[in-house]
Image (cartoon, rainbow, N blue to C red):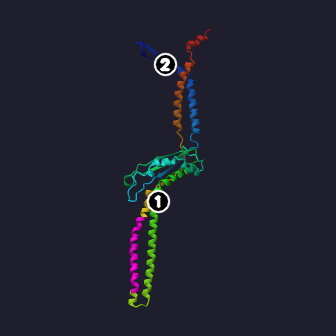
Amino acid sequence: MRNVVDSNGTESEIDLRSYLNRILARWWVVAIFVVLAIIGSFTIQRTQNKNLTRAVATVYLGQPISPNGSLVPNPLSSNPLFANALAHQAAYQDPAARKAGLEATALAGKVSVELISTAVGVKGTAVPLAQVIVQGPFTAAQSAAAANALAEAIVAESNTYTDAKKVEAIAARDRLRARLDQLAQSGTETQARLDALEKAALSPAERSSLTTPLIAMLQFDSNTEAILTDKLPDLETQVDYIENVESASVITPARGSKVAPTSKQFSLFIALVLGFLVGILAAILSTVFWPVRNELEAETTATP
């Protein structure tokens, strides 16, 4: 019990024990709500996440380089928002769903893209790594197939510039290799002709007049081959750099797995607390609409 001062300056007594008495009088109301909360918790645990799976594919979004060797400023393809926008479009979700054996619209609301890296990459820029996540009531294989299909679609769109650049670099490399093969073949043929002339019965003047242009040709082909051979590693390195650094790629393919359910102990604890609190409130309110008879009233009623 405690005393408080009312608005008129007089003290009024508030009996806090009356609320406790109401709760104790209707203890069975509290017990009912606690039991219902426990039953509800176990029911939810049995049905929660029963068929829910999750698959995550890790994607490198690429770092395109301009022809002069500098980083392309703020490339759209390397922005995780670009990947996120693609992953949420039906034009990309529907084909991915069909590849996973799902209905065309099954991935709606089941896909997300998250930036996962703040590491520093080429020339101090942040490495654009992202996760393509599919989570829904699918099998583990379906979730993985859908996530991988979306990741591959994002990579393909991100590599529009680098793919064109790689095609040109590969073509230049292949032309250089073909030219080196021609020079090697020409040098072999020229050397064979010189060897034949050395064995032929010719006068010194005739041999000199025939071998001099061949020797000059052999020397020219050898010098040209040496120059082009020095250029070949640069082109091969450029192709490798485009493929492994500039171009987007799927770093870790997705693997589906069941979503871990919420801890049973934690869920039961929450259910007990909520059931107890709601039960107390219900017990107090029930005494308002269904008053509790005190012992004096009960005795008076029982006396004839």
Label 2: few (<14), some (14–19) or many (≥20) C-alpha neighbours in 10 Å:
few
* Residue 135 in picture, x, y percent from top left: 54, 45
From this view, report whether residue 198 is shown above or below residue 17.
Answer: below
Outermost residue to the top: 304
Magenta segment:
209-235
How far is disc 2 from disc 1 in space, using C-alphas? 82 Å
From this view, report whether residue 204 is shown above or below residue 54.
Answer: below
Q: Main secondary structure of the magenta part?
A: helix
Q: Is residue 217 magenta?
A: yes
* Residue 205 in picture, x, y percent from top left: 38, 89
Number of labelled discs?
Answer: 2
Nearer to us: label 2 or label 1: 1
Residue found at x 42% / y 62%: 238
Q: Dot 1 corresponds to which residue?
A: 164
Label 1: few (<14), some (14–19) or many (≥20) C-alpha neighbours in 10 Å:
few
Residue found at x 53% / y 32%: 271
Residue found at x 46% / y 67%: 174
At label 1, the amino acid type is Ala
Element marked by disc 1:
helix
Query: Is 293 situated left or right of 194 in this image?
Result: right
Q: Dot 2 corresponds to which residue?
A: 17
From this view, report whether residue 46 is shown above or below residue 210.
Answer: above
At label 2, the amino acid type is Arg
First reached walking from the N terminus: tag 2 or tag 1? 2
Using the rendered image of the protein, determine whether residue 256 is visible from the camera's viewpoint. no
From this view, report whether residue 289 is shown above or below residue 255.
Answer: above
* Residue 287 in picture, x, y percent from top left: 55, 19
The one nearer the camera, 2 or 146, is 146
